[in-house]
């Protein structure tokens, strides 16, 4: 009773859940078993498929497991946010922002509670920013570091497809990181 009334209150989440259940049962990417479905973000669907394979045994079990996965993503995002802010500003400011992020009811409702891709997108975006921060601190940047950063960028884009624009801006920033143009690009990134 609590899941549809207090947790997964957006119907979009149930579209993910049903399509993930149908994929796991071998019916393909379909909501109703007849028509093909699309319009979902691929990485979140990949997370949902093994979880909703358990719906054959119990319809509520996947919702409980998904709740734990979303809580783990939120906790990992909080840690990444602390590390990012602590390195940039100070550990005190990082602690304050991370605590606010972890315990704000509004953020909890928006990012965790709806059962959508938002928590995964936040996590992959923070992980990408953390990797960019590490990349900028490296003295020598080889092909391995660039490929690793590109893989994190792909994770961000597949977690939510409209983040492609943000990833492109950071790509341009990294290309022009040794020129003064990078400061204008940072302004564009923050503006967007």
Image (cartoon, grey):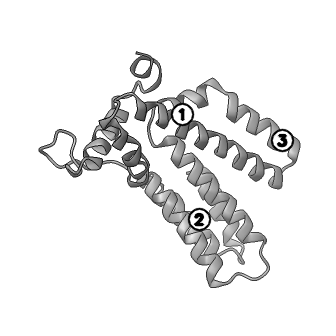
In depth, the one of 15 and 168 nearer the eye is: 15
Q: Residue furthest left?
A: 34
Q: How many marks?
A: 3
Q: Residue furthest front?
A: 57
What percent of the width, then of the height, locates residue 143?
A: 62, 84
Residue corresponding to mark 2 = 170
- Tell which tag, 3 or 1, sits nearer the viewer: 1
Residue at point 69%, 33% (across, down): 102
Q: Nearer the viewer, residue 191 or 80?
A: 80
- Disc number placed over residue 93 in the picture, else none: 3
Looking at the image, residue 156 lies above or below residue 137: above
Q: Which mark is residue 112?
A: 1
How far separated are the C-alphas under marks 2 and 3? Answer: 24 Å
Q: How packed is label 2: few (under 14 Cα within 10 Å), some, or many (20 or more)? A: many
Tell me which label, 2 or 3, sits earlier in the chain. Answer: 3
* Callout 2–callout 1 Cβ contact below 8 Å: no
User: Going by the image, does 49 lie left or right of 76?
Assistant: left
Dot 3 lies on which element? helix
- Residue situated in front as seen by the camera: 190 or 62: 62
């Amino acid at each position: 009773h609590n899941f549809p009334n207090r947790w997964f209150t957006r119907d979009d989440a149930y579209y993910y859940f049903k399509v993930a259940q149908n994929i796991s049962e071998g019916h393909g990417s379909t909501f109703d078993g007849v028509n093909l479905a699309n319009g979902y973000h691929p990485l979140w669907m990949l997370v949902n498929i093994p979880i909703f394979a358990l719906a054959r045994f119990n319809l509520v079990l996947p919702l409980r497991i998904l709740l734990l996965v979303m809580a783990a993503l939120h906790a990992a995002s909080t840690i990444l946010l602390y590390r990012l802010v602590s390195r940039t500003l100070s550990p005190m400011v990082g602690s304050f922002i991370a605590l606010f992020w972890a315990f704000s009811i509004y953020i909890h409702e928006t990012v965790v509670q709806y059962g959508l891709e938002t928590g995964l997108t936040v996590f992959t975006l923070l992980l990408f920013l953390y990797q960019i921060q590490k990349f900028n601190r490296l003295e020598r940047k080889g092909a391995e570091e660039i490929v690793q950063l590109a893989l994190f960028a792909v994770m961000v884009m597949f977690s939510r497809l409209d983040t492609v624009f943000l990833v492109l801006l950071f790509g341009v920033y990294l290309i022009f990181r040794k020129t003064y143009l990078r400061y204008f690009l940072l302004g564009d990134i923050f503006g967007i």
